[in-house]
Image: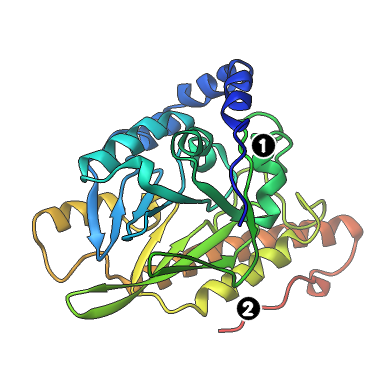
Amino acid sequence: MRTVSRHRPLLAIALLPLLLPALARAQEDPTSRSSNQPVEPYRIAGNLYFVGASDVTSFLITTPEGHLLLDGGFAETAPMIEANVRKLGFKLEDVKILLSSHAHFDHAGGLAELQRKTGARLYAGAGDVDLLARGGSGDFAFGDRLRFPAVQVDHPVHDGETVRLGGTTLTAHATPGHTRGCTSWSMVIEEGGKRYDVVFVGSTTINPGVHLAGKPSYPGIAEDYAKSFATLKALPCDIFLGSHASFYQGLEKAERLKKGEGPNPFVDPQGYRDFLSGTEKAYREQLEKETAAVSRAAGTPETARSGPASPAG
């Protein structure tokens, strides 16, 4: 089991002045500001809690042997996450494992600070390890525009790998496309004598400017998305969560939960299917449009289009 280097906090502090201009620009964006508003933390079900911001999510999974924390939001979200963990009566210092969904500034931005404060081991998709270490520099979608404090991964995870702590097990599912190492996570929780399958979707959306065909943003991106949809559609899901609360109507469900509405509004298997259906439809439409443009440019009939095989199911 690998340990966190004692030199990482010094490295993060040394690099911070270089990163501040990019981070400031990120927060000047109205969309970024709106997705990073403080919200009250709450228990979703079992040992699973929401500790993130208004749209960028962070989830605390508690155990008797320490806790796991999934995603760190923006760099500016880290203090909110720490405050939310404490509001719930837990200690940030008891977080033993950090998990990453994907290496973008609005989800990985706070990981370096959270790692510094907790000494927790960071688990992230193997395809995102280098991007996290570069602080987002050289991203295939954003180039060097949306950087964040660099963070070192202690354990690169691969499809099907499990992370265990205090009787809780999370399973990593490789769902690349949004980033090369985008990872969705699943677990089983118990609530009221029932067991629920929980899925945390990394992301299946396509960022503006990303290309799937012709000159793809990276080789094999279209095939990666196709495999990711197949993977996610095959997972059992009762409680649907994700890297953005807007994926699963998190703010609305939290308000309903606060009012004591039953059954638990986060139990939403249909919402999971609808999200995947909608984002897969957008993917297929973009792929068909780009493939048709390539065919026209080459002077070949559109019926000769080729693309990844349809995912099973």
Q: Is residue 243 above or below residue 225?
A: above
Nearer-the-camera pick, 171 or 248 = 171
Whether residue 141 is visible here, answered yes or no, is no
Which quarter of the figure is the N terminus placed in?
Answer: bottom right
Query: Crowding at label 2, few (<14), some or many (≥20) Cα neighbours within 10 Å?
Result: some
Q: Amino acid at mark 2?
A: Pro
Indicate the position of residue 210 as horizontal and vertical percent values.
68, 47
Q: Earlier in the sequence, mark 2 or mark 1?
A: 1
Which quarter of the figure is the C terminus placed in?
Answer: bottom right
Say which quarter of the image contains residue 77.
Answer: top left
Nearer-the-camera pick, 184 or 84 = 84
Q: How many marks?
A: 2
Label 2 and label 1: CA atoms lie apart by 28 Å
Residue occupying image coordinates x 70% and y 30%: 144
Residue occupying image coordinates x 63% and y 30%: 7
Q: Is residue 124 above or below residue 235?
A: above
Q: Which residue is mark 2?
A: 311
Nearer-the-camera pick, 74 or 276 = 74
Say which quarter of the image contains residue 199.
Answer: bottom left
Query: Crowding at label 1, few (<14), some or many (≥20) Cα neighbours within 10 Å?
Result: some
Circle 1 SS class:
loop
Q: Amino acid at mark 1?
A: Phe
Whether residue 167 is visible here, answered yes or no, is yes
Say which quarter of the image contains residue 23.
Answer: top right
Q: Is residue 168 above or below residue 117?
A: below
Q: Which residue is mark 1?
A: 142
Circle 2 SS class:
loop
Nearer-the-camera pick, 313 or 237 = 237
